[in-house]
Image: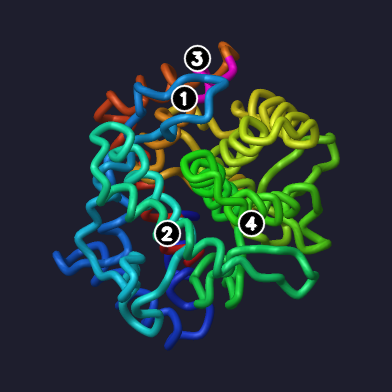
Amino acid sequence: MTNVGSYVLRGFLEGPRLKRLQYLRRIFVAYLTRRTSHLTFWHEVPEINTRFRPNELGEYYMTFFSKADYPGEYDGKGVPLLNYHGKIGLQYNPIAIAQYSLGNFNLYRLTRDSNRLQSFLGVAEWLVTNLERNTKGIWVWNHNFDFEYRTPLKAPWYSALAQGQGISVLVRAYQETNCPSYLETATRAFESFKIGVDQGGVTYVDENGNTWFEEYIVNPPTHILNGFIWAVWGVYDYFLATGSTVAEKLFGQAIQTLAANLSHYDVGFWSLYEQSNTRLKMLASPFYHNLHIVQLRILYRLTGEGIFRRYAEKWEEYRQSTLKRTAALFYKVIFKLCYY
């Protein structure tokens, strides 16, 4: 049997069979049926908002227009709920809630539709109400459901991505309304970026002095690329809103980390989703590969750093190649079978 075949077989046989069956059943419903699921929200075509301006706290950097018109379920106050199906079911996801809000903010700025403003501010209120202290006493937005990652995430878990995008919502809500509770909550949430993951924060400094913002708080850290970049934008927005020298420094350190490590996310035919610390590397899905390209183009506009444009162009060339797309998809399937 080939090494790849051995990995596939081992992936099916290792771990509790019942949990694996439940996971596969839930994923089948999400990926292979037309039922509304969490993927209905996440898999919007990534799109740059060409109306944003560097060094200005205005419209958000991606449009999120489809997310603003999410066709799934909402609670009684108009806050979106994601349907993960299976044992997880309907859940509040702070990241999705923030992106829904940012999409409505962009549409409000574009159309001046008061309903869009109401949707944006309604979610900002949810973020104010639901920020809470974790077990280390740090203010976070928790995910209150277990989630299947290679190192399973046990509720309640928190994320630099949620922290960053929640901040991006709240500083815009403060700018729009001058209501102090929005900025006060954003400031509490920003504290998590000043604190290491071992102390309840979301920041990890590696042995080379690189500063990372971790989407999933696991050990060893996996440095998920898209989540890191979105979190970086939250730090940047907090700096624009407050002039915080700490935020400015953290943003600069994170940009240096990205510039120094982008080569580690390039496998010669596709981009990596994360630094997986596994024998097989975790390639990005086609959706996340496209997202990486959009994020890098935005980073180039924000910073002027040529390395972001170069990798965006390089990864776009990969995307345009049928052979490389096919190879990436096959590799991704093998990885999932082996490690999930």
Q: Residues within 10 Å of mark 2 (few under 14, many from 20)?
A: many
Q: Is residue 149 visible?
A: yes
* Camera-side mark, 3 or 1: 1
Q: Residues within 10 Å of mark 1 (few under 14, many from 20)?
A: many
User: For the point 40% across and 80% down, which residue is it?
Assistant: 88
* Camera-side mark, 4 or 3: 4
Q: Position of residue 119 (x, y in %)?
A: 33, 55
- The one nearer the camera, 283 or 58, is 58
* Camera-side mark, 2 or 3: 2
Residue farthest along the front direction in this orientation: 178
Tags 4 and 3 in contact by the CB under 8 Å rule?
Answer: no
- Which residues are the magenta region? 298-303
Please indicate whether residue 21 sits to the left or right of residue 207 in the image: left
- According to the image, label 1 marks what residue? 298
Query: Which of the marked residues, 1 or 4, is nearer the chain's N terminus?
Result: 4
Query: Which of the marked residues, 2 or 1, is nearer the chain's N terminus?
Result: 2
Spatial distance from mark 4 to mark 3, Cα to Cα? 37 Å
